[in-house]
Image (tube, helix red, strand yellow):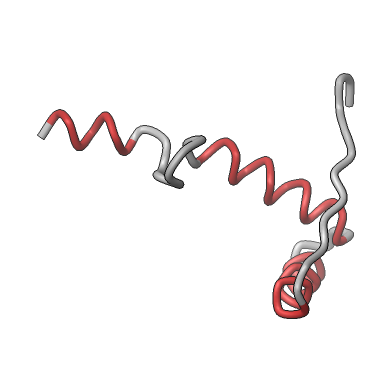
């Protein structure tokens, strides 16, 4: 992956268990599962306020 970076985080036990189960269901490592989930989250949610991207525009049209 060009121009990539590494991110280290500390998860609480519940989040770690959720990540572990999700990784197993998807036949991925925890690292890959965390990567996929973070990329998905960043692409779906806006930068401020955690609103879904595109949702703000729809509200102003109504």
Task: Assign the C terminus to one quadrant of the image.
Answer: top left
Question: Which quadrant would residue 27 be assigned to in this image?
Answer: bottom right
Give x and y (percent) for residue 17: 76, 77
Residue 58, above or below 49:
above
Count of numbered labels shown in the rendering: 0
Residue at the limit of the structure toward the top, as seen here: 2
Residue 8, above or below 13:
above
Task: Assign the N terminus to one quadrant of the image.
Answer: top right
Give x and y (percent) for residue 3: 86, 20
Residue 51, above or below 25:
above
Could you tell whether 7 is left or right of 41 in the image?
right
What residue sits 46% from the left and 38% below the top?
48
What residue sits 81% from the left and 70% below the top?
24
Residue 40, above or below 18:
above
Could you tell whether 53 is left or right of 37 in the image?
left
Question: Which quadrant would residue 60 be assigned to in this image?
Answer: top left
What residue sits 51% from the left and 40% below the top?
44
Give x and y (percent) for residue 5: 87, 32
Could you tell whether 59 is left or right of 8 in the image?
left
What residue sits 49% from the left and 41% below the top?
45
């Amino acid at each position: 992956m060009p121009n990539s970076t590494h991110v280290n985080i500390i998860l609480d036990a519940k989040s770690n268990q959720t990540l572990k189960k999700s990784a197993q269901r998807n036949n991925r490592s925890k690292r890959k599962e965390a990567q996929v989930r973070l990329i998905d989250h960043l692409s779906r949610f806006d930068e401020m306020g955690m609103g879904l991207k595109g949702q703000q525009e729809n509200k102003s049209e109504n």
